[in-house]
Image: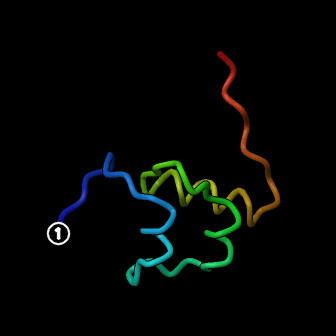
Amino acid sequence: MMLDEKTTFTKQQFLKSKSLNWNKDVIQAVLKEEQLYTKKEAERIIKMYLEGKRERKKVK
């Protein structure tokens, strides 16, 4: 199955994924249950968490 960059996934889908080599505890800790993420967004959030950085809030 070919996925485009805009395809979104839930936290549960990332947790169940067998193709991603991500630590399940980190996914559980940093991704929100009710939110959808692209693979790229989830990777960025996880990387920031592992590097000890906080996600910046978007200012309107």
Count of labels in the image: 1
Residue at image coords 57%, 57%: 33
Quarter containing the C terminus: top right
Please identify the quarter of the rendering in which residue 46 is found.
bottom right
Please identify the quarter of the rendering in which residue 48 is found.
bottom right
Which residue is nearer to you in this view: 60 or 47?
60
Q: In the rendered image of this protein, does residue 56 appear above or below residue 48?
A: above
Secondary structure at numbered mark 1:
loop
- Characterize the local packing of mark 1: few (<14), some (14-19) or many (20 or more) Cα atoms within 10 angstroms: few
Q: Is residue 13 left or right of residue 33?
A: left
Relative image position of residue 20 (x, y in whole percent): 45, 77
Relative image position of residue 19 (x, y in whole percent): 38, 81
Amino acid type for the residue under numbered disc 1 = Met
Residue at image coords 72%, 44%: 55
Q: How is the image coloured?
A: rainbow
Give the residue furthest to the front: 34
Give the residue furthest to the top: 60
Q: In the rendered image of this protein, does residue 59 appear above or below residue 47?
A: above
Residue at image coords 17%, 69%: 1
Residue at image coords 42%, 68%: 13
Relative image position of residue 2 (x, y in whole percent): 18, 63
Pointer 1: what residue? Answer: 1
Q: Is residue 21 left or right of residue 53?
A: left
Which residue is nearer to you in this view: 45 or 8?
8
Give the residue furthest to the right: 52
Which residue is nearer to you in this view: 33 or 21?
33
